[in-house]
Image (cartoon, helix red, strand yellow):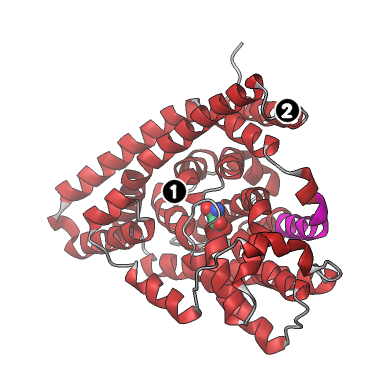
Amino acid sequence: MKFSLNLQILFAVIASFILGIALQQMDPNAAFYKNFMFACEIIGNTFVDLLKMILIPLIFSSIAVGVAHLRSHGNKHRVWKTTLIFFLFTSSLAVLLGLGAANLFQVGKGLDIHLFDADMAHFQARQMTLPDFIVKFFHGLFINPFAAMANGDILAVVVFALFIGIALIVLEEKTPLCLNFLEEVLAITMLIVGWIMKIAPLGILALLTRLIAGQSLELLATLVQFIAVIIGTTLLHGLVVLPLILFVLTGVSPAFFFRGARESLITAFATSSSSATLPVTLRCAEHHLHVDKKIAGFVVSIGATINMDGTALYEAAAALFVAHLTGVELNLLQQLIVFITAMLAAIGAPGIPSAGMVTMIMVLQSVGLPAEAIAILLPIDRLLDAVRTMVNVEGDMIGSLVVQKLTRPE
Ligand code: ASP
């Protein structure tokens, strides 16, 4: 009997929960435990490495081809404008939700910050003020493309691919060979993504088993209210707000969307990286959600680096959490600063595990909160990162459907 990939991934998720919880009961020094975790590490890393291997050629070719094809799209200016407006709109909703939930539930009040003294003492916070962040951000945009590709510097690769795509539009019929070549690169990389997906169930099983087995229940219990509010609000955004926007703007039903998107959502959960998940996200958008290649290549690939609703929501809520912990009451103006910096932090965070933690420092410092407080958040970040990354990639896929619908030439 042959199971579909979707079903295999579902089995993998269920099995990983059972295995992860069983492993939590075991002695971490037992030989079996160690060997099992070692095997999971090798398999999980291999899966992520394969995705990363294909990522740069894929991002580069999909964006360049996506942009170049906009020339035949009657509404090319509408496509990029709609994309940006949609990303900003949904991210600001996410931040508002994060701020709203943190204010409503007053998360962090009543917890004693001294509980975390030991963690904080060992933590060396790197400084990252808002101006530092902006300088760094602009500095990272334009880089020698070969260096950027070799270093996996995704934002710079995106920018260079945008240049190439726009040049191909301007040159119109003069560069058919180059465009053809890039189209072929894209077709080849997508085929390889299909091969990589064959081991996705195994990779996801290994990654999730490690994730669950490695959770410290004690720590989770101390911060349970914060974790519940963050996960609850992130899921509210992912399961209600985004699908509602999708339905209102396009008429696409949430059931259809989630059926088509689940490979990517689960991969995002397991890898905590929107970049590593991008090959799968693109595949879902094109094959399962029937988004036109040209639109998906553009919207999803750019979204993977700049559109992060889950991260934006988290950064805002976590800043308020730290404020409550330290007994600081943030007034409206300060919350507005958190709003803006959380948006910037989400745009600037690369799509890699715990990237949001680094940009979080800027959000904290922008309103004078101690960056050391990150020490409290780091140990629980694996779990929260998994959830927010899932919503990050969801936003990209929904964006591609919305842009496709709103820009369809009459
Ligand atoms: N891990 C997230 C992502 O790749 C970024 C973050 O840390 O929030 O989308």
- Displayed-image quarter of ligand 1: bottom right
Residue 27 placement (x, y as % from top left) = 73, 28
Residue labelled with disc 2: 27
Query: Magenta residues: mostly which secondary structure?
Result: helix
Q: Is mark 1 on a helix, strand or loop?
A: loop
Location of residue 398 by image quarter: bottom right
Report the Cα–Cα distance between label 1 and label 2. 51 Å
Residue at image x 58%, y 30%?
206
Residue 33 placement (x, y as % from top left) = 65, 24
Which is more toward the observer, 386 or 191?
386
Q: Is mark 2 on a helix, strand or loop?
A: loop
Disc nearer the start of the sequence (1/2): 2
Location of residue 269 by image quarter: top right
Residue at image x 66%, y 30%?
10
Q: Is any atom of residue 82 visible in this view?
A: no
Q: State whether label 1 is within 8 Å of ligand 1.
A: no
Determine whether 182 is above or below 361 in the image: above
Which is more toward the observer, 194 or 372?
372
Determine whether 15 is above or below 384 in the image: above
Residue 20 placement (x, y as % from top left) = 71, 31
**Pointer 1 with pointer 2, Cβ within 8 A:** no
Which span is picked out in magenta?
A: 221-236
Q: Which amino acid does label 1 sit on?
A: Asp
Location of residue 76 by image quarter: bottom left
Residue labelled with disc 1: 292
Quadrant placement of the C terminus: bottom left
Residue 84 placement (x, y as % from top left) = 48, 69
Residue at image x 82%, y 51%?
221
Q: Is any atom of residue 262 visible in this view?
A: yes
